[in-house]
Amino acid sequence: MSGPEESEPDHRFTLANERTFLAWLRTALALLAAGVAVVQLVPDFGIPAGRKVLGVLLAALALLAAATSVLRWRQVDRAMRRSLPLPPARVPWILAGVLALIAVLTLILLALAPQ
């Protein structure tokens, strides 16, 4: 039993998928840079390990963005080649939710920091 027949998609769609993949990688790189900056450059919050926790969370989010970008690129490419509907995009919701939690944690750390 063979799988669905594949055909070469329009190059514009293939390149658009690749640009989206590269945008996800830029986002992952920015999150990683932010994590390093928080640990190395931001003054101490006055709370032990506060900077390190934020830095680790941002780096973990960068890892998630980078890893899932490859999976998403492959899923979309496969769907286009097989003339199937595009798969649902769940990862942006997860990334946005985790980033919102990191922002709330940052606000809490800033509010609790000694003046």
Image (tube, rainbow, N blue to C red):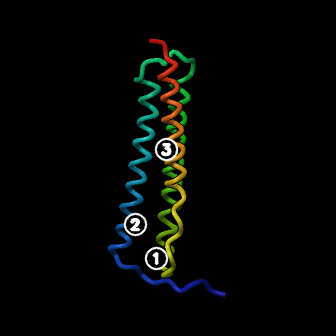
**Would you say 2 lies left or right of 89 here?**
right
Who is closer to the viewer here, 111 or 59? 111
| Mark with earlier residue (3, 2) | 2
Of all residues shown, which one is farthest toward the front?
111
Q: Residue at x 49, y 48 (%)?
A: 96
Tag 3, which secondary structure? helix
Mark 3 lies on residue: 62
Amino acid type assigned to the residue bearing label 2 in the image: Asn
Q: Which residue is drawn at 52% across and 19% down?
A: 112
Amino acid type assigned to the residue bearing label 1 in the image: Met
Q: Are marks 2 and 1 in contact (CB under 8 Å)?
A: yes
| Mark with earlier residue (2, 1) | 2
Mark 1 lies on residue: 80
Amino acid type assigned to the residue bearing label 3 in the image: Ala
Can you give x and y, in whole percent of width and height, for residue 46 in the image?
51, 15
Tag 1, which secondary structure? helix
Of all residues shown, which one is farthest toward the left?
12
C-alpha gap between disc 3 and disc 2: 20 Å
- For label 1, count other residues whose C-alpha is less than 10 Å away and answer few (under 14), some (14-19) or many (20+): many
Can you give x and y, in whole percent of width and height, for residue 82 in the image?
50, 81
